[in-house]
Amino acid sequence: KAGVTQTPRYLIKTRGQQVTLSCSPISGHRSVSWYQQTPGQGLQFLFEYFSETQRNKGNFPGRFSGRQFSNSRSEMNVSTLELGDSALYLCASSLEGPADTQYFGPGTRLTVL
Amino acid sequence: KQEVTQIPAALSVPEGENLVLNCSFTDSAIYNLQWFRQDPGKGLTSLLLIQSSQREQTSGRLNASLDKSSGRSTLYIAASQPGDSATYLCAVGDTGGFKTIFGAGTRLFVKA
């Protein structure tokens, strides 16, 4: 089975712009979670989707949003980028949620200038 | 609110040594506990998953234990190798919401 894929792998944006990141889960997995990883804060939960529904959201401003499509692929969007949004964004897929093994993609490295 | 703590934050050992990494969590209402490995700038690789009803899991040189009542887990690495150098993260599947909560990780360096 192919693993979790994330595109793009690297992004450079400037403050004020917006960005969309994509995650394709392992075939058959219906849950996708997104995390932000920074050296200072570690891995922080952004949101989790299951069958196109957001079931939980972390403590991030409304500039961070996401969605999931009927084929379980997911996108996250960050609007009005700030310097502090520079991070590694990771997505994880699982069969049905946190009760199952989480499989991570390689991440998207976002740099905001 | 679930919190996950890992001790130590960093560890340096000579090759061949057996070592233990520690993870503690504040709320025992968990689905499971998972140990991950992360190499610099890369994604996470799942090492072991322990369901809340289990006490331990083993894979090769790795053994993870879970004591849910005391809120603790340990990852035992036998006969460490330089290739084991990485950051090790533990994470709990929280029944309080559809999310997995991570510790800050232990950075391991195995010297040849």
Image: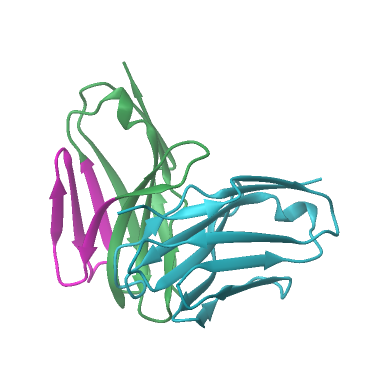
Chain colours: A cyan, B green
Please tell me whether residue A81 belongs to the stretch shown in magenta: no
* Left or right of residue B56: residue B106: right
Quadrant position of the C terminus of chain B in the picture = top left
Residue A103: image location, x then y, percent: 36, 57
Q: Identify the residue at horizontal 14%, vertical 40% (top origin).
A: B60
Residue B71: image location, x then y, percent: 29, 66
Q: Residue furthest front?
A: A71
> Looking at the image, how many numbered discs can be counted on the residues?
0
Q: Quadrant of residue B23?
A: bottom left
Q: Residue furthest top?
A: B112
Q: Between residues B85 and A71, which one lies in front from this camera angle?
A: A71
- Magenta segment, which residues? B47-76
Q: Main secondary structure of the magenta part?
A: strand
Please tell me whether residue B56 belongs to the stretch shown in magenta: yes
Q: Identify the residue at horizontal 41%, vertical 57% (top origin).
A: B5
Q: Identify the residue at horizontal 59%, vertical 67% (top origin).
A: A75
